[in-house]
Amino acid sequence: MSLYIPYVDNNRTPIHVAVVGASGTVGQKVLALSAYLPWIRITEIAASDTRANAPLSSCPWREVLSMPKSLSSLRFCTMDDVSAPYILSCLPHDVAEIYEPLWAQKGHHVFSNASTFRMSPEIPLVVPEVNAHHLSLIHQQKTRGKRVNNPNCSATALACALLPIVQHYSVRHISIVTLQSISGAGYPGVSSMDILGNTIPNIPGEADKIVMELQKILGSGDQALCTPITVNVHRVPVLYGHAATIHILLNDPAPDVVDLYHQFNQTHPIFALHDCHNRPQALHDLSHHDMRIHMGPIHTAALGSDSSVVAVNILSHNLVRGAAGAVLANLACFLNATTQHS
């Protein structure tokens, strides 16, 4: 299996990493993916105090990929005992609020999947292929250790899909409708009586979160993108994979945007472009280590001589590209940036 991580140096001496929140859905995916990355070594795992001193093998393993044999005997420590220089945080919002600033004060570098500090002005909200330059915000942080966040799982894929168009055209408005899988709600997720045979046209706070995060990611770092964005969100009975339909209103004649994505892939091979009218589909196109943004047929239409609309469907793996793979990618991006400037 290969796992695409940008800005990675596979020849570097492995760094020591702690995974906190390691017993949860995202934490287990991080542990599973780490087995394929020679540049990191998981030396600590942490979860709630009730798991302290228990081996990873005692934890119910819900991840589809196998538990790495090299980690099965590794014992959980408490949050207060974490000592590794790099911490991958898969903590819930309220726990992250307590521990992530403390770790940074102690000199640990923290890469967080939690939503807690995403909109803090001094904390970069990074998708490496999109805005790696935002890492410069860490110089505004006064702690010895630095903190980097990855975005909401849907916002990550949306930012990738929007970037080539936002960079090349004048965008008047962006309209987004998401179809988000049940695993995005964490374990045990949504009640089966609510989701089986059903769709739920609301995820509390999600639409506003996506708008704000996209504006921060696609902005300049100090200033947010000012293009209006409207979002409607839905929870759908799919286990893995968040889909979205995007309509982008341009102040330009209808462009041939497909070539933009092919050009982008020459630097960062993240787009899987599908020509078939009924693809992409989570069941047929996603793998359990998939960092790609799958894009359905891209349609453009003229709205007169000086405006047009671009319409596209996208699909990404919410636990890989949107969460576990995202923190690993941000760690690699940070290491690349700090090595270049050291």
Image (tube, rainbow, N blue to C red):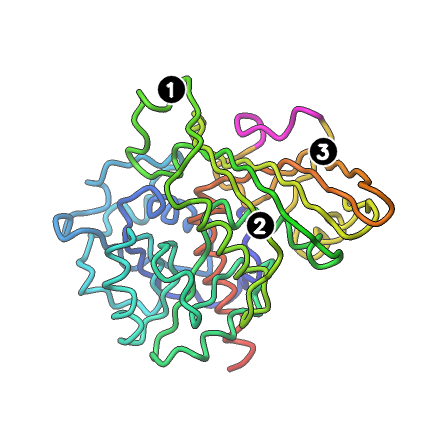
Q: What residue did someone put label 1 on? A: 196
Kind of residue at badge 3:
Pro
The answer to which image quadrant residue 254 occupies is top right
Q: Residues within 10 Å of mark 3 (few under 14, many from 20)?
A: some
Kind of residue at badge 2:
Ile
Q: Secondary structure at mark 3?
A: loop
Magenta extent: 277-285
Q: Nearer the viewer, mark 2 or mark 3?
A: 2
Along the viewing direction, whichever of 320 and 125 lies nearer the viewer: 125
Q: Residues within 10 Å of mark 2 (few under 14, many from 20)?
A: some
Upstream in the sequence, badge 3 or badge 1? 1
Q: Is residue 123 left or right of residue 108?
A: right
Question: Most extreme residue toward the front, as rendered?
Answer: 304
Residue at position x 54%, y 35% in the image: 243
Residue at position x 48%, y 37% in the image: 233
Q: Secondary structure at mark 1?
A: loop
Depicted 192 relative to depicted 68: above or below: above
Upstream in the sequence, badge 2 or badge 3? 2
Kind of residue at badge 1:
Leu
Measured in 3D between alpha carbons, the distance from the residue under mark 3 to the one under mark 1, in whole angstroms, is 29 Å
Q: What residue did someone put label 3 on? A: 297
The answer to whether the residues at label 2 and label 1 have Cβ atoms under 8 Å apart is no
Residue at position x 32%, y 71% in the image: 108
The number of numbered discs placed on residues in the rendered structure image is 3
The image position of residue 337, as x and y in percent, is 53, 72
Q: What residue did someone put label 2 on? A: 229
Q: Residues within 10 Å of mark 1 (few under 14, many from 20)?
A: few
The answer to which image quadrant residue 247 occupies is top right
Q: Secondary structure at mark 2?
A: strand
